[in-house]
Amino acid sequence: MKYQTKTLAWLLAGTLFLSAAGSSSVPNVKAADITPATGANIVLKASPATLPAIAATTPAISASPSVSPSATPGTTPSTIPSASPSITPSATPSASPLLTTPTTPVVSAIRGGSKRVKLYWNKINGVSGYNIYYSTSPNGTYTLAKKISGNSTVKYVKTGLNQKQTYYFKMTSYVTNNGYTTESAFTKVLSAKTVSVSSTSKGAKKYANKTKFKKSAAYKKYKALSSYMTYSKSFAIPGLKNTNVAGFASKTMIPKAICQAGGYMLVSAYDSTKKDESVIYILNRASHSYITTLVLPNKANVSCMAYDGKNIWISKGDKVAYFPFSAITKAVTSGGSYSTLNAYTRYFAVQTKVNIMTYYNNTLWIGATNNTASSKMYGYSIVTQNNLCYLTSKYTMAIPSRTTGVAFDKNGYMYMTVSYATNSSKTNYISKLYKFKPDLNAPNKSNQILKGSKLKTLTLPPKAENVCVYGSYLYNLFRKYVFFLQISGRPCCGNKAFFFIEMITKQSFSDRNFLIIP
């Protein structure tokens, strides 16, 4: 069988991290008898006209009564009300509506950064917002730093602070009703010290040459890769030693997904300690150099990414989200060490959890990793209306169990990584790369695309995950913290972090090169 072989490159991470949905009768009511409600409190009006009528005439007396009644009755009839009601109803609502004291917020984290402090708290349903107060001493005067409207915001960053100084914070929630506000009790006082934050590291120390690399623990662990060495296509993955996350230092970032987009290679990472937001490292595709970091709006584990020519698509649990590619170019042209993405353009719930994703032939392919059975990958058309994207289900494709990554090359060949467990002694262990040629233009009656038989199978080191195609090469990202344990069980080469790329050239699967990515 003749087939076109794809040049492949695998990206493998190994680093140390520091912590880890009938009718009824109605009485007649005059409009004048109804008083419009002015708020939550309803006031009933008592009107003299509604009181029982009192007789104005004297009862008739016979001409010759046997007993002459006294001229004046002995007692006043009890049926006659007093001239004025004993209680005068209020004509206006009470001074304030009855409000329940809201729940005190629970602060989940506080972090000191460069001239700033960041707070996270748990969302409280039913409140109108939150108040954040700060002071330079625990028992001093607290100033309102921010009044937040709405209960969905659960993060606040106080900037413009003095460097290397401790600040104290407390906060409340509040409820507003009919112009009146009730505030919760204060949280306990929390403190954080501002600190200096270094720039994002561009990579651990890179070996000067192949000879020095061959002495590394990683190389010795996988001697079968001994002939696969070159630096020419290597990318140094930034941020492992330190990532500047919008003025806060993270030393626990885990690279998760890779994506080629325009003139850039994108690498997503999340904070294993969940202290800081997730990021995308932006690298120059031609020079292989780190440019800057895009800080994402939340702490989502971005396990996969895709680029459709206009937008960057990311995974977020059981949803996908997108933002315009212009956010990448804006971050690059800003010239800063980082930029922030305030919000994704839109979220979408899809037919599956989102662990794998790629874009090819006007179709966004999305699938889930199933470790026990085969699964489905869904193909969606991207439709744009009023400058917003919408997803329309288009195709399905059966995929193997334990699929962790998928990518297409320009010729329509499809590459899938299938991986599970950390080594061959573990039950159901596997780590392989499969090559297919699906017929994307011939779905069956159920709109299912058949991927066809395997054209190639290649054994990989453990925990192969996300893949992407860049030119003639396919890059495969490995779960770094698991692979680190596989290499030596201890910090490899001090505290240096390593990434590896295996490249398979166009000519043959036997002509391969192993690349270091520090």
Image (cartoon, rainbow, N blue to C red):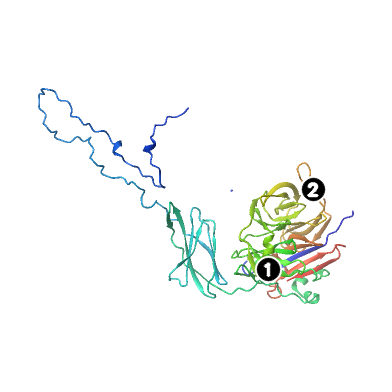
Q: In the picture provided, is 393 more to the left or to the right than 152?
A: right
| Disc 2 element | loop
Q: Residue 65, percent across and down? A: 11, 24
Q: Residues within 10 Å of mark 1 (few under 14, many from 20)?
A: many
Q: In the picture provided, is 358 more to the left or to the right than 316?
A: right
Q: Residues within 10 Å of mark 2 (few under 14, many from 20)?
A: some
Please name the residue that numbered disc 2 is placed on.
450
Q: Residue 410, percent across and down? A: 81, 56
For residue 4, what is the image quadrant? bottom right
Q: Amino acid at mark 1?
A: Thr
Viewer-side label of 1, 2: 1
Q: Residue 84, percent across and down? A: 24, 42
The furthest residue to the front: 32
Please name the residue that numbered disc 1 is placed on.
292
Query: Is there CB contact under 8 Å for labels 1 and 2?
Result: no
Q: Could you tell me which residue is drawn at 74 percent across and 55 percent down?
A: 359
Q: Is residue 377 above or below residue 472?
A: above
Label disc, if present, on residue 308 of the rendered structure: none
Q: Could you tell me which residue is drawn at 30 percent across and 36 percent down?
A: 49
Q: Residue 87, percent across and down? A: 27, 45
| Disc 1 element | strand
Q: In the picture provided, is 145 more to the left or to the right than 409?
A: left
The furthest residue to the right: 1
In this rendering, does residue 103 appear at all? no
Say which quadrant the C terminus sits in: bottom right
Task: Give whichever of 359, 107 is nearer the camera.
Answer: 359
Q: Amino acid at mark 2?
A: Leu
Separation of residues labelled 1 and 2 (CA atoms): 40 Å
Task: Give whichever of 32, 193 is nearer the camera.
Answer: 32
Earlier in the chain: of badge 1 and badge 2, it is 1
Task: Give whichever of 305, 241 is nearer the camera.
Answer: 305
